[in-house]
Image: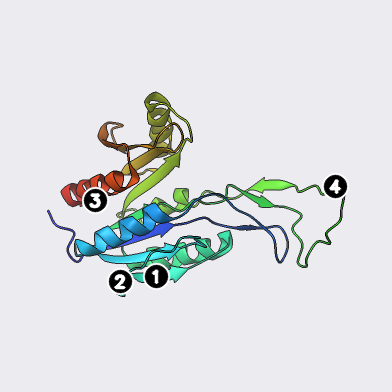
Amino acid sequence: MSLKAKKILVTCGPVWSRIDDVRVISNISSGQLGQTLAAGLERKGARVTLLLGPVTQPLTLTRSIRVRRFQYFDELQRLLAAELKNRYHAVIHAAAVSDYRVRNSSASKIPSGKTLLTLKLAPHPKLIDTIKKRAPRTRLVGFKLIPAGSDAILKTAANALLRKAHCDWVVANRIRRGYRGLILDQSGSVRAAAAAKHVLVQRLIKTLESDL
């Protein structure tokens, strides 16, 4: 099968949670995997929309990739809800979404020099859980990061996400002790494995070519 003219939505990069009007909670996601994936899908003929977070290493992308930028969780939440009305063939939700928000965030800069500052955190809603509810016919790829997990731990985490978010595939990643990525399908079977991110991207694209 071919990805030519298939509409694919990719989210990638870190997602900020506001502390005050100049400080944020973030994470170490570079967004490179998602950007590389968007570029690879476009080369296969797919019509790609990329929801791109505040990445520190932006890649040069062709103009045929439609890029919509965000920084904060609520911005991504609004963009995702709007884009899901566009009947994508697949959504690849690779963004490293903030799990928590600051309950006592400030609308202005918190003065420096405090000897102790306590931040109270509350969980953000899980955006991936909303995707199939909004677009039940769209094929969904979820991502799960277990920084130092064994294959068994990666599989367990991936299977939990498959069930909870009704994903069609889940990519489970390990970034410590050498990169490791597993692609699992709805049945929990490992469709492909990779020891480098660029190989993982190639194998995920091949999986989508076979099944979309």
Position above or below: 102 against 179: below
Mark 4 vs 1: CB contact within 8 A: no
Residue picked out by circle 2: 62
Q: Position of residue 33 (x, y in %)?
A: 37, 52
Label 4 Cα neighbours within 10 Å, binned few <14 / some 14-19 / many ≥20? few
Q: Earlier in the sequence, mark 3 or mark 4?
A: 4
Instruction: Determine which quarter of the picture holds residue 10.
Output: bottom left
Q: Is residue 124 left or right of residue 150?
A: right
Q: Specify the quadrant of the image occupied by residue 72.
A: bottom right
For label 3, the SS is helix
Q: Is residue 118 left or right of residue 124?
A: right
* Residue 134 visible in the displayed image: no
Q: CA distance from mark 2 to mark 4?
A: 47 Å
| Amino acid identity at mark 3 | Ile
Q: Secondary structure at mark 1?
A: strand
Residue where numbered disc 3 is placed: 205
Q: Pointer 4: what residue?
A: 116
Is 185 above or below relative to 127? above
Mark 4 falls on what kind of element? loop
